[in-house]
Image: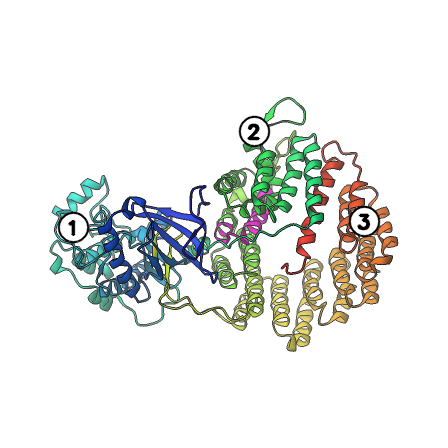
């Protein structure tokens, strides 16, 4: 999806527009949302046609006919205004790749998928013809593939049977019936001819060969189709559909009778194609809030500090941190800060000039999460182009240093997921190693689950399918490479022993179980999803309009947990299986507070069966953090046993402090790291008795030993109740580092104060 251009409308009718989906001869298609928040596509007719009275009459007829189209696989207009200055119509947006996009990647569908495709298209034509419409442009780019089956889209050149003149060109070369090519009147049979061509192409057999459109058109009129490569299941039917004489072709009803399967279709496409579907999710609208007065002052001071930093890399990095905070209030200004950070600059040794691509590459490697957050919050074509550039850079970095860039891919996917889950899914799948893919998709899905549990569930299912495909990672993924963006360091490569394939499968299955469990919790929190009705319509991510079949039945949280448990129990390694089952049991406790005690007991028992201490402590940490609110005594008992996870202990102590200071202090007493202990004690004091927290804050500052990064952490703790004290701490920062100077840490710290201020404000999520 592209961002809106400066001259694009921001609203059509009652629909708010957010981006561009595509354009064609008839007009432009925009992504937007209805007043109720439903994702929609709005097709705005080209001004060249708007002044044609005859066109408006035909358009009105087609809109009315389109409203009558029903069925599971055909388009229906849900709103329109043929009398507007520029006529428009609206359909609901449903994610899914077109058949053309699928064939470009996978070349052909398997025979069973082609059969289901044919049945779905026949059902769609029955609905279209029943509304007295001829589609006239059935082709792979106008067929959307979803979990439920194919959907016929784009009625841009459709016409009512009784219309005397076509609205535009008669069709697409290669898919037009012989009678249409020779100028004879179009009938319903021309859609059947196109269906036959589509089925052959979907099976990987172009029936009239390849070459220039004129050559293919000539063969359509004069030659017999070459169907020798087609599977026998459909060869005879396709040959009938491609008959030169329209009356010799079967009707859509006859095609459906021959191809239809009255049983339920649970997975009509192979896994790799199903895994493409989450990549076409509808982006979420961004919410711009207004800054508080103190945040305005903080941001201004942070911006000035960032601009004073002498080192080009550190200055750009600081500006990204500031831009992230600014993007909550003023996305346009945040993008200007980012553009400024990417301007050509003198390298730190003063010998050369860094270009935009070099700086962007550096920022992708160091602040991917913050960079992605700024870009997805911006409503501009330049932000979209920069995200495209980043994807190109990521592919390059993956080839050159796969091991070191895995975390970058994951962080960027997380950053993008909240606004554009489709792009997040594509980014996560860039990495060749399946375990990295699974972890990146999982983390993105957990972000998506907060706002769209149904989409997150689809992403989780993709991880499940990925677990079944896991093999040993390619040789390139088993290499460790020093990042090229680190200056003045020689590249060094060394081989590592490849990990057995079953371990990668177990790791992927763990992420699948974890994600399904998290989505189950999100679904339980959000309540039942709104029902999807048959009379809604859809549009592809590429901008073509089409139908929305009823959504797959959304599974209940209990069903998702059962699926997660099934995946967990199939894990081979005992420790990994125990961790996965612990995660599922913890999710069950979060979903059902009434049964939380027994669920937490089960989770703890499973966690303690792990033989490896690191896995056991990871599993127990899951239990402790989840049990803080409902079973603080259990959380304390577990936390005090976590010898190697002091940061988890600190997190538990901080969470308990809100309700039980004495318990929180007992938990914190087990922390041996001087700074972590002092910081937690300061946080407990700030949460429970801010008026007398200065003593503990002073101890934390002393334990920081003038380390700027640690001072920022203390300031963030103070900011919860003592914002003025926090800002004072920021101004005392001194740094002996010539690169990340005191101004760097002030800029970053003040930006973090603003982020924390907004995250803890009333009404924030």
Element on which disc 2 rests = loop
Residue 662, x across and y down, in percent: 84, 66
Element on which disc 3 rests = helix
Gap between marks 1 and 2 measured at Cα: 55 Å
In this view, 93 is above or below 491: below
Q: Give the colouring mode of the picture.
A: rainbow
Residue 136, x across and y down, in percent: 23, 54
Q: State the predominant SS element of the stretch in magenta.
A: helix
**Mark 2 surroundings within 10 Å by alpha-carbon count, few (fewer than 14), some (14 through 19), many (20 or more):** some
| Residue 355's disc number | 2
Q: Which sits earlier in the primary sequence, circle 3 or circle 2? A: 2
- Taking 233 as reference, is 149 left or right? right
Numbered range of the magenta stretch:
404-425
Q: Which of 108/485 is in front?
A: 485
Residue 539, x across and y down, in percent: 37, 55
Q: Residue furthest top?
A: 351
- Taking 44 as reference, is 436 left or right? right
Tag 1 near tag 3, CB within 8 Å = no
| Residue 725's disc number | 3
In this view, 280 is above or below 730: below
């Amino acid at each position: 999806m592209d961002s809106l251009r400066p001259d694009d409308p921001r609203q059509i009718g009652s629909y708010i527009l957010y981006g561009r989906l595509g354009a064609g001869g008839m007009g432009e298609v925009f992504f937007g949302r209805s007043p109720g928040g439903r994702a929609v596509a709005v097709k705005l007719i080209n001004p060249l046609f708007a002044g044609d009275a005859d066109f408006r009459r035909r358009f009105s007829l087609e809109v009315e006919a389109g409203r009558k189209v029903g069925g599971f696989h055909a388009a229906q207009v849900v709103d329109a205004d043929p009398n507007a200055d520029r006529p428009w119509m609206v359909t609901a947006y449903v994610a899914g790749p077109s058949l053309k996009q699928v064939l470009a990647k996978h070349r052909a569908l398997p025979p069973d998928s082609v059969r289901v495709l044919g049945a779905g298209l026949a059902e769609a034509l029955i609905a279209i013809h029943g509304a007295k419409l001829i589609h006239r442009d059935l082709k792979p780019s106008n067929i959307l593939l979803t979990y439920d089956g194919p959907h016929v889209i784009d009625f841009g050149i459709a016409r009512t049977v009784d219309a005397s003149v076509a609205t535009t060109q008669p069709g697409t070369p290669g898919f037009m019936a012989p009678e249409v090519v020779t100028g004879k009147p179009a009938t319903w049979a021309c859609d059947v001819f196109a269906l036959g061509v589509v089925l052959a192409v979907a099976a990987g057999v172009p029936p009239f060969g390849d070459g220039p459109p004129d050559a293919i058109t000539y063969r359509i009129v004069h030659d017999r189709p070459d169907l020798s490569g087609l599977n026998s299941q459909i060869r005879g039917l396709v040959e009938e559909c491609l008959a030169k004489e329209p009356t010799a072709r079967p009707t859509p009803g006859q095609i459906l009778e021959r191809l239809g399967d009255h049983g339920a279709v649970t997975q009509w496409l192979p896994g790799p194609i199903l895994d493409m579907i989450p990549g076409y999710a509808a982006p979420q609208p961004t919410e711009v809030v207004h800054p508080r007065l103190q945040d305005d002052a903080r941001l201004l001071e942070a911006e000035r500090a960032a601009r004073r930093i002498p080192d080009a890399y550190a200055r750009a990095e600081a500006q990204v941190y500031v831009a992230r905070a600014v993007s909550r209030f003023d996305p346009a200004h945040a993008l200007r800060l980012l553009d400024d950070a990417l301007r050509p600059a003198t390298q730190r040794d003063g010998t050369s000039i860094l270009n935009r691509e070099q700086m962007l590459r550096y920022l992708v490697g160091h602040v991917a999460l913050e960079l992605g957050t700024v870009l997805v919050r911006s409503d501009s074509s330049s932000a979209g182009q920069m995200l495209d550039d980043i994807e190109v850079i990521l592919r390059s970095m993956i080839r050159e240093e796969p091991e070191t860039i895995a975390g970058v891919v994951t962080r960027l996917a997380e950053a993008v997921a909240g606004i554009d889950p489709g792009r997040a899914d594509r980014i996560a799948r860039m990495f060749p190693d399946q375990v990295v893919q699974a972890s990146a998709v999982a983390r993105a899905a957990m972000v998506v689950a907060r706002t769209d549990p149904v989409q997150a569930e689809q992403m989780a299912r993709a991880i499940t399918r990925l677990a079944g495909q896991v093999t040993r990672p390619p040789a390139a993924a088993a290499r460790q490479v020093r990042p090229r963006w680190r200056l003045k360091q020689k590249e060094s490569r060394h081989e590592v022993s490849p990990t057995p394939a079953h371990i990668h499968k177990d790791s992927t299955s763990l992420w699948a179980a974890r994600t399904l469990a998290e989505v189950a919790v999100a679904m339980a929190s959000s309540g039942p999803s709104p029902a999807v009705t048959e009379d809604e319509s859809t549009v592809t991510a590429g901008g073509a309009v089409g139908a929305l079949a009823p959504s797959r039945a959304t599974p209940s949280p209990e069903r998702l947990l059962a699926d997660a448990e099934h995946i967990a129990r199939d894990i081979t390694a005992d420790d990994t299986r125990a961790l996965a089952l612990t995660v599922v049991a913890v999710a069950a406790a979060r979903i059902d507070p009434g049964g939380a005690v027994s669920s937490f007991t089960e989770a703890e028992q499973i966690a303690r069966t792990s033989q490896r201490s690191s896995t056991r402590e990871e599993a127990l940490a899951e239990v402790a953090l989840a049990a803080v609110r409902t079973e603080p005594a259990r959380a304390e008992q577990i936390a005090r046993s976590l010898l190697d996870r002091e940061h988890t202990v600190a997190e538990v102590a901080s969470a308990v402090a809100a309700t039980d200071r004495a318990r929180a202090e007992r938990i914190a007493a087990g922390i041996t790291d001087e700074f972590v202990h002092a910081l937690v004690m300061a946080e407990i004091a700030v949460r429970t008795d801010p008026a007398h927290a200065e003593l503990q804050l002073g101890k934390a500052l002393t334990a920081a030993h003038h380390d700027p990064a640690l001072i920022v952490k203390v300031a963030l703790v103070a900011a919860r109740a003592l914002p003025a004290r926090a800002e004072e701490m920021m101004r005392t920062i001194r740094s002996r580092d010539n690169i990340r100077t005191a101004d760097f840490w002030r800029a970053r710290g003040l930006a973090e104060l603003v982020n924390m201020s907004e995250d803890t404000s009333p009404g924030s999520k």
